[in-house]
Image (cartoon, rainbow, N blue to C red):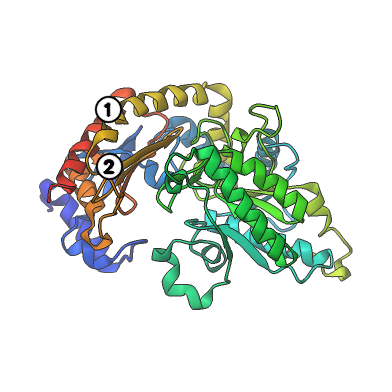
Amino acid sequence: MTNPADRNATLAARDLKHIWHPCTQMHDHETIPMLPIVRGEGAWLIDAEGRRYLDGISSWWTNLFGHANPRIAAALAEQARTLEHVIFAGFTHPPAIELAEELVRITPPGLDKVFFADNGSAAIEVALKMSFHYWLNQGHGEKTRFIALTGSYHGETLGALSVSDVALYRKTYAPLLLTPILAPSPDAYEGEPGETPAQVAARRLDELRALLERHAHETCAVIVEPLVQCAGGMRMYHPDYLVGLRRLCDEYAVHFIADEIAVGFGRTGTLFACEQACPGSGRGAGVSPDFMCLSKGLTGGTLPLSAVLTTNAMYEAFYAEYGAGKAFLHSHSYTGNPLACSAALATLAIFRDEPVLERNRALAAHLARRLEPLRDHPHVAEVRQTGMIAAVELVADKATRRPYAAGERRGLRVYLHGLQHEALLRPLGNVIYFMPPYVTSEAELDHLVEVATAGIARAVAD
């Protein structure tokens, strides 16, 4: 019989015998522990030996209302007793219908059609293909390219990777990928000395205009992560950029794809990040993209599901007699899965019934106060925050913002320190970030910051 004290090691050994994990150099697990998680409670994960870890990254940014949330679990159980799955071509079911209706109700005006897929990368693939196919159906087959931001990340399938600009993910597969047109990111961290985030956004919009003047004739769409470029290092920018982007897309007849996969569902302080763009005098009016891609928090972190919302005009460009050959022939076996749709409906019901955004704003303010002392740290170039996303940029030299060499893996030291002190912190290189579940308490946020602060001290000690 296995000694209870060896349960983690036993499960880890069984795992490593057969499983190849994502985003991992598997050789690392010769020295870095593989942690078997057997249970979740609220913002906490519990391993096979009973040790607890505060989930500071919402399990890859998916978990909103805590692990094993009883309301979502009950909805899943009820649906599992009724219908687990059905082909979504020629068939439908109430959870998908209700979810589509609710998504149309809560997203920006004009997004009236919903196309379901099963993960974030798939949603990006759908939006890219649909944008290209729209222009083809309209007689503009010359439009075959996409504009993306420097430092962007949109997923790791070939299409999504084609419009990403993080070398760690893209470099190896470059020969297989489309070549995007890269527009300079409005990332406020890259601003000139004394330049405000709004001024950075204005300057970058001028540069985007210059690109569109040269390339609009061959461009299908501009794709951006609104407000926060997450996997690119939690880079943040001013919402004015979204206002200007919408205007430029209209002026130059290209589509605007908003990748809200990571930033949607309350992460940035509003239900969707696009809501923070304020055209004209309508403060908080937001902008409506041509495509909005959603996933991650859509099901509260329980099951894979994604959705692409788009306009009636987009839909009508494909609506024709069969013989016209204009149909959008894209599918996934688990499209519109009833279990996932039911989890999403339960998740959205929590937003509807509880003051989630108000609580998030209070938690975000508390997190900001706790992180404030790190601004003076000699190896911290910046502490930045947008809603329930906060990031600490570690550098070798604060005055010049010279980064640590990637091979030194300073962020990994913070991660390992966190595991030893009941916290899951999984940095992006040398960017230590916080993206906790919305059920995290102020005391639990304190714990995350305290562990991260001690971990940073350890990481920069030599």
Q: Position of residue 63 (x, y in %)?
A: 43, 40
Category of crowding for the residue at label 1, using alpha-carbon neighbours closer than 10 angstroms: few (below 14), some (14–19), many (at least 20): some
**Which residue shows up at 70% across the image and 38% down it?**
104
**Which residue shows up at 27% across the image and 66% down it?**
26
Category of crowding for the residue at label 2, using alpha-carbon neighbours closer than 10 angstroms: few (below 14), some (14–19), many (at least 20): many
Is residue 86 in sight in this rendering? no
Q: Position of residue 139 (x, y in %)?
A: 84, 68
Q: As rendered, which of 405 and 120 lies closer to the eye?
A: 405
Q: In the rendered structure, which amino acid carries the disc numbered 1?
A: Asp
Q: As rendered, which of 122 and 166 lies closer to the eye?
A: 166
Sequence-wise, the earlier of marks 2 and 1 is 2
Q: Position of residue 402 (x, y in %)?
A: 29, 53
203 relative position to 383: left or right: right
**Which residue shows up at 81% across the image and 50% down it?**
313
Element assignment for label 1: helix
Instruction: Indicate whether 35 appears above or below 26.
Output: above
Instruction: Indicate whether 309 appears above or below 167.
Output: above
Q: Nearer the viewer, mark 2 or mark 1?
A: 2
User: Residue 223's image quarter?
Assistant: bottom right
361 relative position to 284: left or right: left
Element assignment for label 2: strand
Numbered tag placed on residue 446 in the rendering: 1
Q: As rendered, which of 158 and 384 lies closer to the eye?
A: 384
Numbered tag placed on residue 380 in the rendering: 2
Q: In the rendered structure, which amino acid carries the disc numbered 2?
A: Val
The residue at the far bottom in this view is 175
Q: Position of residue 125 (x, y in %)?
A: 60, 61
